[in-house]
Amino acid sequence: MAEKQSNKTEKARAAFSRQVGEKAARKLKAQRHVTRTIWYGLGMMGLVGWSVAVPTLLGAALGIWLDKHHPGGHSWTLMLLLIGLILGCVNAWHWVAKEDKKIQEEREDNDV
């Protein structure tokens, strides 16, 4: 009789431990999964836009300064504007790829 009682107690403890483990896992998953709102998307578009615009404008400004102080046969403004644009696009591509990777990892975690 005491053996049956002990066996029931162990089963109850095991079930309770399993429930606590499942709840803890759900809570951790919920903490990792942050709901993204439309403001997050707009913020990311702004970040990508600025990551292209800033190097482009800096390149153009530096080119204008160089054209004024060191005139030559070629346009520093146009060349540095193009270089700034290329650097900005590479920077934006980096941000988008990073966010895409994060989204894919979250989807894989949700599928498990």
Image: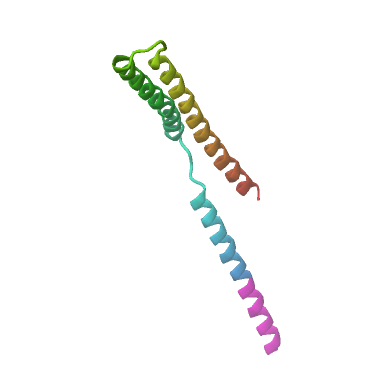
Q: Nearer the viewer, residue 48 or 55?
A: 55
Residue 75 picture quarter: top left
Specify whether 30 is left or right of 59: right
Residue sitting at the far bottom? 2
Vertical arrangement, residue 111 with respect to residue 84, above or below: below
Q: Residue at x 41, y 22 (%)?
A: 56
Q: What range is drawn magenta here?
A: 1-14
Residue 7 picture quarter: bottom right
Q: Residue at x 70, y 87 (%)?
A: 3
Q: Nearer the viewer, residue 32 or 5?
A: 32
The majority secondary structure of the magenta stretch comes to: helix
Q: Residue at x 46, y 19 (%)?
A: 82
Q: Position of residue 92 (x, y in %)?
A: 48, 30
Q: Position of residue 23 (x, y in %)?
A: 55, 60
Residue sitting at the far top? 73
Q: Which colour style is shown?
A: rainbow
Is 10 inside the magenta-drawn segment? yes
Tell me the quadrant of the picture where the N terminus can be found.
Answer: bottom right
Residue sitting at the far left? 69
Q: Position of residue 24 (x, y in %)?
A: 54, 61
Is 6 inside the magenta-drawn segment? yes
Q: Nearer the viewer, residue 105 or 93?
A: 93
Q: Residue at x 61, y 49 (%)?
A: 109
Q: How many marks?
A: 0
Q: Position of residue 64 (x, y in %)?
A: 33, 16
Specify whether 3 is left or right of 104: right
Q: Nearer the viewer, residue 41 or 100?
A: 100
Residue 68 picture quarter: top left
